[in-house]
């Protein structure tokens, strides 16, 4: 059984377990890191989402990739007792992250990727191979905006090259996603900027002003 959520579709039982309030951000990316600074970018994204968006953001992961944990763990640690992190895993799979809540999402990885993408308001992609590319395609089909950190390579670069800047995102922030010369803090701040702009578009209250990039 499925339930429509805007243009998104998710299993009824899963939808009932996710918070009704908050801006859901799905995390897409590689099971292991390939880029030299990808892990640092992810850690900074997680921390800045916590600092600048706070508990209004709900993180959704697939519960099995380096990118999933590298963003969601610092987010969780920065919001003790307040962070909302849900790991969507196929039935029978285990998530070893040790924080957040694990929810059953589908019977296999293909179903989990579809459900993860369709349960979000927006998605962040870092690196990524064929599985990430499939999640990105699923997100597009569900009308979910994808923020691809293109400088990390893989499916994220491919998405950036063929994608379009969200209307509310600044041209500067969008450009930073692909800037290999920019600091990792500036890139992470750009991701947070875009998330905040998308939150504003949906009417979800903002939690913090934008700090100056470092």
Image: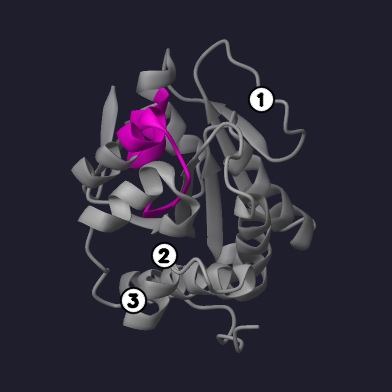
The magenta segment is: 112-135
Query: At 43% from the left edge and 27% from the top edge, which residue is drawn?
Result: 13
Query: Closer to the camera: disc 3 or disc 1?
Result: 3
Which labelled disc corresponds to residue 169? 3
Residue 121 position by quadrant: bottom left
The front one of 59 and 169 is 169
Query: Dot 1: what SS?
Result: loop
Q: Tell which circle, 2 or 3, labels the residue nearer the N-terminal end.
A: 3
Residue assigned mark 1: 95
The front one of 130 and 196 is 130
Query: Dot 3: what SS?
Result: loop
Which labelled disc corresponds to residue 178? 2
Query: Dot 2: what SS?
Result: loop
Q: Quadrant of the N terminus?
A: top left
Query: At 63% from the left edge and 37% from the top edge, which residue is drawn?
Result: 66
Q: Is residue 207 above or below residue 154?
A: below
Query: At 51% from the left edge and 48% from the top edge, which residue is drawn?
Result: 19
Query: Closer to the camera: disc 2 or disc 3?
Result: 2
The front one of 169 and 90 is 169
Magenta-drawn stretch contains 28: no
């Amino acid at each position: 059984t499925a339930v429509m959520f805007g243009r998104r579709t998710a299993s009824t039982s899963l939808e009932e377990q996710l918070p009704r309030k908050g801006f859901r951000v799905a995390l897409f990316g590689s099971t292991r890191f390939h880029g030299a600074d990808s892990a640092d970018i992810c850690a900074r994204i997680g921390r800045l989402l916590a600092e600048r968006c706070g508990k209004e953001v709900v993180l959704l992961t697939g519960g099995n990739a380096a990118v999933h944990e590298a963003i969601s763990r610092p987010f969780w640690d920065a919001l003790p007792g307040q962070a909302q992190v849900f790991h969507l895993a196929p039935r029978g799979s285990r998530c070893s992250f040790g924080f957040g809540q694990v929810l059953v999402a589908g019977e296999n990885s293909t179903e989990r990727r579809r459900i993860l993408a369709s349960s979000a308001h927006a998605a962040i992609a870092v690196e990524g191979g064929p599985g990430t590319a499939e999640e990105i395609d699923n997100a597009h089909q569900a009308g979910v905006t994808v923020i691809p950190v293109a400088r990390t390579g893989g499916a994220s670069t491919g998405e950036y090259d063929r994608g379009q800047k969200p209307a509310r995102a600044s041209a500067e922030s969008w450009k930073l996603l692909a800037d290999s010369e920019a600091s990792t803090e500036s890139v992470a701040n750009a991701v947070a900027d875009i998330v905040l702009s998308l939150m504003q578009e949906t009417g979800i209250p903002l939690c913090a002003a934008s700090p100056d990039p470092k």
